[in-house]
Amino acid sequence: MRSQDYDRLYLSPPHLGRHEINYIQKAIEDNWVAPAGPNLAGFEADICAATGVPYCVALNSGTAAIHLGLILLGVGPGDEVLCPSFTFVATANPIVYLGATPVFVDSEPDTWNICPKRLREAILDRIARGKKPRALILVHLYGMPAKLPEIVALAQEFDIPILEDAAEALGSEWQQQPLGGFGRVGVFSFNGNKILTTSGGGALVTHDRALAEKARFLATQAKDDAPHYQHSELGYNYRLSNILAGIGRGQMGLLTERVKRRRQLFDWYREHLARVPGLTVALAPEPAGSRSNRWLTTILLGPPDPEADGPAAPAVTPETLRLHLETRNIESRPLWKPLHLQPLFAAAPMYGGAVCEDLFARGLCLPSGSAMTDGDLRRVKEALTEALE
Ligand SMILES: *Cc1c(COP(=O)(O)O)cnc(C)c1O
């Protein structure tokens, strides 16, 4: 079997530039083959420069960054943490690592992110039941900024700290301000499918120097300041390798270009799929003030018949579309399956649900890698048109 199928169009494969190899080579020549070294400091400085957030700790995954971030916000056993249902499971798993419970909230239809109205309802109801949520995880799905002013105001009103899961949103902006710095802690992922990658990796950013120092301490086994191995706190082995940080240095230099290309792909799809019957290229408008990195272009089947009650039942489902694309060797994926529908979280509280359930029933993610050519785009369009006609 070939290790890579060159004819296959992947959803969001890694896209390397020319300089990653130089940083790796230098790390090997200088023997910095460890979770310490100059690429780490350089990668962290690059992330600070790109996001405008003053402190950064590079970690070995976005999931690890969420885990440490929740610890920094004081989440522990028995706590409740507010979280959108419509997201990747890695947003919520660290809540459970800490013995806390996720409280899921539906999306709003404009950006598909956590709904401020439902969020208020959830906060008031949890308080009425005797427990104020300890933290709020805010996700910008597919790179689209959530409704920041409303959500930040709610968090302030109830004094609930925000962990901003910007794993999919590196390079996205709200009012010209990069995402990731709107909470007490922000998180990025450099997994292989993200807009930039270190193969696997993550980062925690914060405006608070003490929080950053604490994160670095916890990520390196929580070694106390002593000549021998002395530990007073529970630590983790979450630091990124200096080799992978070298890939990250090369990648960070490409962020502007990569965002530009993903936005071009989105515009191409929107223009060329507009006349394919039964298809809506979703997230078409960016709400005023928002600029998405368009990490993935997504489509919705439908739109639902306004006369019908309940979600529309389109003749072509996302799954039949996906299977047809597969016969053309094109990878596509359903939108994230809402977490309140996952067996893992069957017992967790959920506020609303109709919006994200409808998105899941009608949506599909299209190939969106920044290395795609115009020929690749035409291939996807032809396959979609075949399936829908
Ligand atoms: C990818 C992703 C994560 C997890 O990042 P990893 O680096 O894969 O651990 C968390 N949240 C969201 C929304 C993601 O898309």
Image: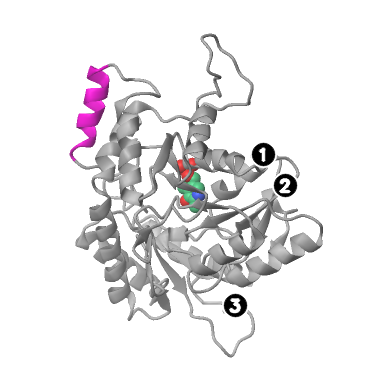
Give the magenta part as a residue range. Answer: 18-30
> Measured along the vertical axis of the image, is residue 59 above or below residue 177?
above
Helix, strand, or loop for circle 2? loop
Instruction: Decide if residue 109 is in sight here.
Output: yes
Q: Is residue 217 left or right of residue 190?
A: right
Q: Residues within 10 Å of mark 1 (few under 14, many from 20)?
A: some
Front-most of residues 74 and 257 = 74
Along the polypeptide, which appears first: circle 3 or circle 1? Answer: 1
Q: Are marks 1 and 2 in contact (CB under 8 Å)?
A: yes
Residue most toward the right?
Answer: 129
For discs 3 and 1, the disc positioned in front in the rendered view: 1
Vertical comparison of 319 with 217: above or below = below
Q: Magenta residues: mostly which secondary structure?
A: helix
Dot 1 or dot 2: first in sequence order is 2
Neighbours of disc 3 within 10 Å: few (<14), some (14-19), many (20+)? some
Callout 2–callout 3 Cβ contact below 8 Å: no
Distance of label 3 from label 1 (alpha carbons): 36 Å
> According to the image, label 2 marks what residue?
79
Q: Earlier in the sequence, mark 2 or mark 3?
A: 2
Which disc is residue 98 wearing? 1
Kind of residue at badge 1: Leu
Assign the N terminus to one quadrant of the image. Answer: top left
Residue 190 visible within the image: no
Residue name at image x 25 percent, y 59 percent: 261
Give the Cα distance between marks 1 and 2: 9 Å
Q: Quadrant of residue 155?
A: bottom right
Q: Assign a secondary structure to mark 3.
A: loop
Say which residue label 3 marks. 311
Is 238 included in the stretch rendered in magenta?
A: no
